[in-house]
Image (tube, rainbow, N blue to C red):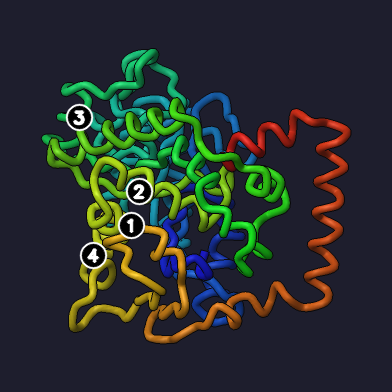
Amino acid sequence: MLAYGITTAQSVAGPLHQSIEMREALEAGNLVGPRLFVSPPLWEGNRLFYSFARTLRTPAIAQIEIDKAKRMDADFLKSYVRAPIPVMERIAQGALDLGVPSGTHLVQPGAATGLAGTTHLSATQRMGYGWSKSFVRAITYQDAADIYGKGDFHLIDTLFSAGALAGLDPGIVSDPRFVLVPPNFVSGLRNAAPPTAAQIATIVNDATQQAKVRAAGALVANGTDSPLVVPGISLHLNMRGAALVQGNLAALQSVTRDAAKMAFVGEDLGTVEPGKLADLLVVNGNPLADLRAAADIRLVIKNGRAFTIDEILAPARTPGQLAARRLALEAQEKLCRDEPHHCEEAGAHAH
């Protein structure tokens, strides 16, 4: 992520102890990467989807997890798809007590329970009325947009469809930073074809729905669903997708100024102003004219410290790491031969 210019990452769910370890290692300089804001696991109801999630059946059980998150100084609390409404309310209150943002997939009852926003414009649901896009045309209508805008309900939009724009940028795979791409995304990116007219239309439609929410007065930040999509690269593709409708400046603001506000750190990050932390990028070109320039990074400055791309890539270029990567790629290629559906799924995420 740091190699692609991301100086701060807001996790919205993760194994808590490992996340804290990673946050501390980054702060101590023992890992090279962005500043990390962490979150406890996804908090579910009677059933869970991801193995690292937690099932919180009652508000009392939820409070145990919330108290642990407070002790661990978590930066975000997420109520996932199956959390009961009383548990959602308890999570919302826990985030308010801790002074951190919170999120859910459900626009309603998410907003009604006091949660701060959604982590996608539309994603998996358990209630028919929780959808914020129509099923056939994927349209966000005024009632949903107004919940965001008039209710001060925030949106992190992940623009899955924008991954198809990888096919317009063959430089992704020839870039030295490609050595950092997880093996399960390598084949999909190497074989990415230019998007079809239908794919472009889907991206424009998705970006239009995001623009409606922003026009309704909501705080909107572009993010990604990593690790379901390739880290770093996906954020740039999402920006390019949003810019097709909203323009380059709005797309850039959505991952800087607006993302910092979303994480409740707008006083320290997100804009270049006296007194704020020095997070800056030196790029080759003008991103306001061509957003591809935002990815053509020559120098990353995080918290006042400058990193060259070679410095960031150095840990991945040791003989041991290169050998391990070759083995991982070989294992992924074998998996593709033996069980092609795995590669088709990874390719779909990458695209």
Q: From the image, state whether disc 3 or disc 4 is nearer to you.
A: 3
Q: Residues within 10 Å of mark 4 (few under 14, many from 20)?
A: some
Q: Quadrant of residue 105?
A: top left
Q: Does any portion of residue 290 appear in the rendered image?
A: yes
Q: Where does label 1 land, which residue?
A: 255
Q: Which label number is shown at residue 145?
A: 3
Looking at the image, which residue is at 71% across and 46% down? 187
Q: Which label number is shown at residue 321?
A: none
Q: CA distance from mark 3 to mark 4?
A: 24 Å
Q: CA distance from mark 1 to mark 3?
A: 20 Å
Q: The residue tagged with tag 4: helix, strand or loop?
A: loop
Q: The residue tagged with tag 3: helix, strand or loop?
A: helix
Q: Residue furthest bottom?
A: 305
Quarter the C terminus occupies: top right
Mark 1 and mark 2 in contact? Answer it, CB < 8 Å.
yes
Pointer 1 or 3: first along the chain: 3
Q: CA distance from mark 1 to mark 2?
A: 6 Å
Q: Residues within 10 Å of mark 2 (few under 14, many from 20)?
A: many
Q: CA distance from mark 4 to mark 1?
A: 12 Å
Q: Where does label 4 land, which residue?
A: 266
Horizontal arrangement in the rendering, residue 75 relative to residue 49 (left or right): left
Amino acid type of the residue tagged 2 in the rendering: Asn
Looking at the image, which residue is at 44% across and 19% down? 126
